[in-house]
Amino acid sequence: MPTSEVARLPPAPSWACGTGPESDVVLASRARLSRNLAGIPFPHAASDSERRAAERQIMQVVWEELFPSPLGARALDLAPERLSEVERSFLAERSLLDTPIPWRVLATDDERLAVQIGAVDHLRIIGLAPGFVPSRALEVVRDTDRALEQGLNYAVAMDWGYLSSEIMNLGTALCVSTLVHLPALSLLDQIGSISESMENSGYELVPFPPVNRMPTGEAGAHRAPRGARQPSSDATLYLLRNRRTLGSDEVAVVAKLEEYTSTLVHYERGARQELLASKGEEISDSANRALGVLRFARCLPASEAWALISRLRLGVVAEVVSGVSVETVTALLFINQDNHVEQRRACEGNGEDGGTARARIFREMLGVSRAD
């Protein structure tokens, strides 16, 4: 598809920057179902003719069942192999692309529902929503799955459930996650103990890479490599997700994720109040200094910008910073990513380097005129 399809996307994804329940801590919720067609090899083992047959079969049903609703008349229709490396990485940063690269990706124009054809499985259905609403994300993908199942013969085994090329996806083939911002817990050095407490639970808390992120397959959005190491103490954005899909039904998987996420929300808010009580002036000063730098800097590398945005977001939700919304600051987290900056530069066609372009974009987002 032409580059203009990618250029249609807004600066930051609506599913992460909208207003949702518990959005001071939980940026977004995601659900993903994986499906494969019976009688056709998994994508990595399929021949060109088998690949074309699978794509035709799926696309025919997609057009019949998902248009005009729920994908909509303005749906994105992307052929990733025809896109530039920057465009593919940009889509990966927005959780629309996994690796290996899918044969085709269709998504609503607000990016809250996407269908990937090819890559790891023949079909992946992804639902995203702002805030703490994993049940809503699950409902979106289940409704889509039921519609497609009317015309597709899925690969299912009585003992194993839905089949996948990845063992971790056997069973319900459901992966659910919440994206959480935990700056207070990070400052109090409590992330490690929380992560360790989940070690044998079937769920995990892993860092969500803020910069230089390439597609790594699973997480997709919420895309962070399975088995990721405990991050350094300055990591503040995390992905909470299930590790297994075999042995539990979909509702139980989501219910347990909601339980763990609620606990994290409670802990983060408690840590925030503890910091405000003991170091309120420091938190306020740090957040307002961050706002000043982001508003007026002329060059910002991604890593420095990330730390500033995280400090600012803590100040905004703690109500020690005024004049900027939490939605705007959350959008900066995504716009800060290298390929978001590169895509913006490509669309605008100017000769700025990445750090200069990033600083200018932030000034504009934070209401500073070009002349300031």
Image (cartoon, rainbow, N blue to C red):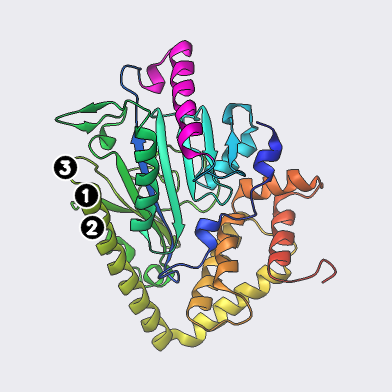
Quadrant housing the N terminus: top right
User: Foreground residue, 102 or 106?
Assistant: 106
Residue density around tag 1, few if under 14, some if 14–19, many if 20 or more, within 10 Å: some
Residue at the image position 39 percent from the left and 53 percent from the top: 137
Measure the C-alpha gap from mark 2 to mark 3.
Answer: 13 Å
Query: What segment carries the magenta color?
Result: 42-67
State which tag comes first along the sequence, 1 or 2.
1
Lateral position of residue 299 relative to residue 158, left or right = right
* Disc 1 residue type (three-letter): Gly
Determine contact: label 2, label 3, CB under 8 Å: no
Determine contact: label 1, label 2, CB under 8 Å: yes
Residue at the image position 65 percent from the left and 41 percent from the top: 6
Circle 2 residue: 256
Which residue is most to the left?
Answer: 159
In the depicted structure, whether residue 300 falls above or below residue 153: below
* Disc 2 residue type (three-letter): Lys
State which tag comes first along the sequence, 3 or 1.
1
* Disc 3 residue type (three-letter): Gly
State which tag comes first along the sequence, 2 or 3.
3
Circle 3 residue: 247
Measure the C-alpha gap from mark 1 to mark 2.
Answer: 10 Å
Residue at the image position 33 percent from the left and 64 percent from the top: 191
Tell me, yes or no, if residue 222 can be seen here. Answer: no
Label 3 or label 1, whichever lies nearer to me, is 3
Q: Quadrant of residue 2?
A: top right
User: Foreground residue, 310 or 3?
Assistant: 3
Tell me, yes or no, if residue 181 can be seen here. Answer: yes
Residue density around tag 3, few if under 14, some if 14–19, many if 20 or more, within 10 Å: few
Q: Main secondary structure of the magenta part?
A: helix
In the depicted structure, whether residue 267 falls above or below residue 148: below
Circle 1 residue: 202
